[in-house]
Image (tube, grey):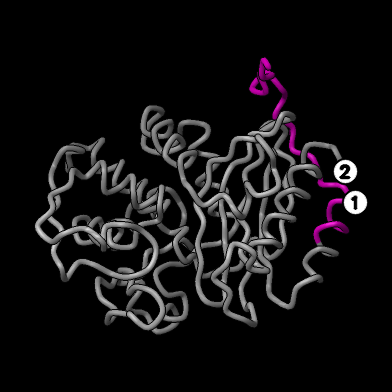
Amino acid sequence: MRRRNFLSLPAVALAPSNDLDSAVRRETRSLDAEVSLYARNLETGTSYGLRENGRVRTASTIKLPIMAAVFDKVAKGELRWNQMLRLRDEDKVSGSGVLHEFSAGLRLPLRDVVNVMIVVSDNTATNLVLDLIKADAVNTFLDAQGLKQTRSMRKVRGDGTQLKAPSGWSKAGLMEENKRFGIGSSTPFEMVTVLERLEKGQVVNAESSRAMIAILKRQQYKDGIGRHLGETPVASKSGSLDALRSDVGIAYTPKGRVAMAITVDGLKQIDESQDNPGLLLIARLAQILCRGLTGVL
């Protein structure tokens, strides 16, 4: 099927319908947790937000800005995609990813490390990247983008009972008021800003933006935003903690591209399954947002 060219549509900012607001609020009341979200139709500019400017714990969605900071350094000639990173036993952390299963001494090109940091949300790969560029450099990049609420705080400690001592702090991460955010903070509005700029080719440069979108499309955790969207392509990055599920991404719907960031925090029970109530809520909200912002509701 030939896909319609949505880029020719006028970018007129419109207000979301009351039906969308009612549908979102009704859905959020179905779960005892705090929901923060923002979504924007990238064709029309129509947007909808709920606590969109409040800071949230990012969990692994902070890996998206970390990736962008690496692309920026490569574009500036400060890093090379083919430079090799050596994996040591002390680098390995538990949780998502595969590198902790590999033998110490393995050497990997930076490009591969960044790819697995996103595609399988590899925690060990994330720490290798932060050891290379430092969390403060990520925040310097974000400052240049005007994203003051999005901060990389520190390296990943791991998962469950196998937590390592926190390390790799940024200046922001050492601030007492930021300790509650864990590895990163952001707002739904700022995460959607990153996604929109990527889609428009405005992060680092057009080539880098296209490459990052391609990596996000290969990201393998599609049980949030992409769960109920059928064959709709999705470029996304998810995150999870014991009491939190989050997902940020772009849904390429037949009626237009919708960028969104959804965080569900304060979940009352630990559930590591794909049917975690937070994931199920994100999936339903993503479907509602896509329909509401493209005029289906």
Of the numbered discs 1 and 2, the one sitting upstream in the chain is 1
On the rendered structure, is 169 left or right of 25? Answer: left
Q: Residue sitting at 30 percent across and 68 percent down?
A: 155
Q: Residue sitting at 58 percent across and 74 percent down?
A: 271
Q: Residue furthest top?
A: 2
- Name which residue type carries label 1: Asp
Q: Residue sitting at 66 percent across and 65 percent down?
A: 36
Q: Is residue 227 magenta?
A: no
Quarter of the figure with residue 125? bottom left
On the rendered structure, is 156 left or right of 81? Answer: right
Q: CA distance from mark 1 to mark 2?
A: 7 Å
The N terminus appears in which quarter of the rendering?
top right
Instruction: Describe the element under mark 2 as helix, strand or loop.
Output: loop
On the rendered structure, is 176 left or right of 137? Answer: right
* Towards the viewer: 226 or 249: 226
Image location (x, y in percent) of residue 71: 31, 41
Per the image, the residue denoted by label 1 is: 19
* Towards the viewer: 14 or 271: 271
The C terminus appears in which quarter of the rendering?
top right
Q: Is residue 14 magenta?
A: yes
Quarter of the figure with residue 251? top right
On residue 297, the disc is 2
Image location (x, y in percent) of residue 205: 37, 31
Instruction: Describe the element under mark 1 as helix, strand or loop.
Output: helix
The residue range painted magenta reads 1-24
Quarter of the figure with residue 123? bottom left
Discs 1/2, front: 2
Within 10 Å of disc 1 (Cα), the crowding (few <14, some 14-19, many 20+) is few
